[in-house]
Image: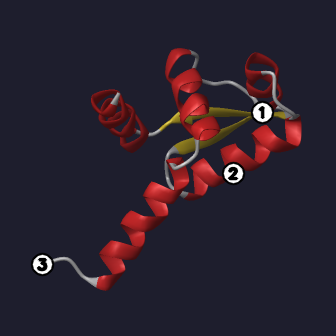
Amino acid sequence: MATSKNYRQLERIVKGFANHRRIEILELLHRQPELSVDEVSEKLSIGYMNASDHIRKLAIAGLVLKRNDGNTVRHKLTSRAQSILVFCKKLE
């Protein structure tokens, strides 16, 4: 039986990808893992701060992992994010 805590965790995950731009970022990181915020903003033609905020929300939801690479932070999808992309494709 699901608990209130489980529902809250599920809500956090769903809110993490409940935005067209964040889904677009998930798709991009699926095709090209290990991108920096700067690279994501450039490839999607969005502002750096906007991309950074979306990636932060994806990370909070447990959908993106961050890895330090010198002065750059690289981002890649978690297995949960991979599953969410499959789910989103089924909804199309």
Secondary structure under the numbered disc 3 in the rendered image:
loop
Question: Is tag 2's residue or tag 3's residue first in the polypeptide sequence?
Answer: 3
Q: Amino acid at mark 2?
A: Arg
Q: Amino acid at mark 1?
A: Val
Secondary structure under the numbered disc 1 in the rendered image:
helix
Residue found at x 87% / y 43%? 49
Q: Which residue is mark 1?
A: 37
Residue placed most toward the observer, 62 or 73:
62
- Quarter of the view holding residue 52: top right
Q: Residue furthest left?
A: 1
Colour pattern of the rendering:
secondary structure
**Decide: marks 3, 1 in contact (CB < 8 A)?**
no
Q: Amino acid at mark 3?
A: Met
Q: Residue furthest bottom?
A: 4
Q: Which residue is mark 2?
A: 56
> Badge 2: few (under 14), some or many (20 or more) residues near its Cα, within 10 Å?
some
- C-alpha gap between disc 2 and disc 1: 10 Å
Indicate which disc residue 18 carries: none
Image location of residue 71, percent across then percent down:
87, 34
Secondary structure under the numbered disc 2 in the rendered image:
helix
Image location of residue 89, percent across then percent down:
34, 27
Give the position of the N terminus as an image quadrant: bottom left
- C-alpha gap between disc 3 and disc 1: 39 Å
> Badge 3: few (under 14), some or many (20 or more) residues near its Cα, within 10 Å?
few
Residue placed most toward the observer, 62 or 44:
44
Q: Which residue is mark 3?
A: 1
Residue found at x 57% / y 42%? 65
**Decide: marks 2, 3 in contact (CB < 8 A)?**
no
> Badge 1: few (under 14), some or many (20 or more) residues near its Cα, within 10 Å?
many
Residue found at x 58% / y 16%? 32
